Amino acid sequence: MSLATSRFPALADDFLARYRSVRARSLALAAPLSAEDQCVQSMPDASPTKWHLGHTTWFFETIVLQAHMPGYQAFDARLAYLFNSYYEVLGPRHPRPQRGLLTRPTLAQVQAYRRHVDAAIAQYLQSPGIEGQSEALALLELGLHHEQQHQELLLTDILHLLSCNPLLPAYGALPEVVAHQDASPVQWLQVGGGISQLGTDDDGLDFCFDNETPRHARLVEPFEIAHRSVSCADYLEFVQDGGYRNPLLWLSDGWAQVQSQGWAAPLYWLAPDDPRCPAPHWQVFGLEGVMALTPADAVSHLSFYEAMAYAEWAGARLPTEFEWELAVNAPGICNMLGTVWQWTRSAYEPYPGFKPRNGAVREYNGKFMVGQQVLRGSSVATPPGHSRGTYRNFFPPAARWQFSGLRLARDA
Ligand SMILES: [Fe+2]
């Protein structure tokens, strides 16, 4: 990793403050949940809250403390097997679909594990000469952004879990004020084409994940992009027009999903004839429980396939991730960040010249660059300060449990 050492003198205190703030936010997100809520896994793609709390702690312990802090004593060496997610170089691990079987360690023990690692990180950051430890500090920075990624996953995973309960219990309000989407009719913004520099470089000035690098030239034709993302009202028209019953709108794999999974609306929509629907009109289950569908809200919890079918129905298309990045600061554009992740037509591929980070974190992003689509933006569940215009999120095309929606584009 190539973060400049010059960034760090006098920043150790700032690091510790940010570390404590990020770590505290994870606990704050878990606070409304019972120990039972935090143990259960609702599907292989989702992880229990307790596992998120342990895994993010394991990341700091393994990547920073064990690699860089002389004399660090592990809290319990057996936890590495439970909380390693996918790092082959760091040894064998518990199967992902069985994370919900881990009634031990208890929640209290995982919380004690967090305190143990937090105390060691504080001690490490206050040790003499820490300013020169640029490699360790860069990994610590990565650990903070990693924990923020898991904060969003904690919310998407707990929402899925609660949706499996027939009582549809509410999680509660998010700690921060949630951005609302612009509700005005769609305006088409014109974006000029040409050769543009996209992506970013890891030059030590601002954090980025390795998959955002390197900055590189890209030819983009002129295009138009909607000033806001697709709303629930927009999407309801598609549903009511038989969008889920018309195979001509769907990619072949998407149509197969519609049929095999019985998709008829976004993941958490409750149709008026659904026995769980408390009123004779469309409702949406969310973190705050079951609420009447709000027409102006951005539609969320869509798969890539649904986003594609909607765009086809609407006579438009999805933007590529490069078009999205070019438009991120276009005059008049709204809610690129902080509302819903927006599916793009771009497959998750390395940028020209991409090189993964060195060391164990080589496995962080690069090995997942196949069979997934890029989403751009950020959502209501993304931690404050975690989003940026070059950020590349990625999920398989059938994934629906993220806060994922779409924004339309079309050729100029
Ligand atoms: Fe992770």
Image: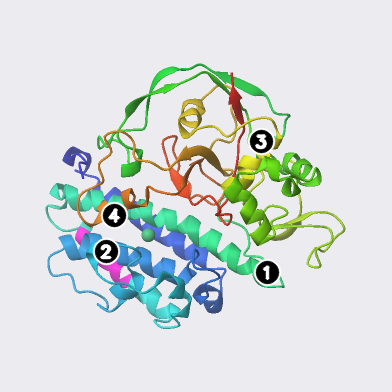
Which mark lies nearer to you, 1 or 4?
4
Q: Amino acid at mark 4?
A: Glu
Cα gap from disc 1 to disc 4, whole angstroms: 37 Å
- Measured as percent of width and height from the top left, residue 126 is found at 20, 58
Task: Count residues near mark 2 (Cα–Cα under 10 Å), then give few for <14, some for 14-19, many for 20+.
Answer: few
Q: Is residue 200 above or below residue 112?
A: above
Quick check: can you spot residue 404?
no
Tag 3, which secondary structure?
helix
Asked if the residue under mark 2 is in contact with the one under mark 4, i.e. CB atoms within 8 Å, the reply is yes
Left or right, residue 149 beside residue 82: right
Q: Which residue is mark 2?
A: 88
Tag 1, which secondary structure?
loop
Task: Count residues near mark 1 (Cα–Cα under 10 Å), then give few for <14, some for 14-19, many for 20+.
Answer: some
Cα gap from disc 4 to disc 3, whole angstroms: 36 Å
Q: Nearer the viewer, residue 248 or 107?
A: 248
Closer to the chain start, of discs 2 and 3, is: 2
Q: Which residue is mark 1?
A: 169
Cα gap from disc 1 to disc 2, whole angstroms: 37 Å
Magenta-tinted stretch: 115-124
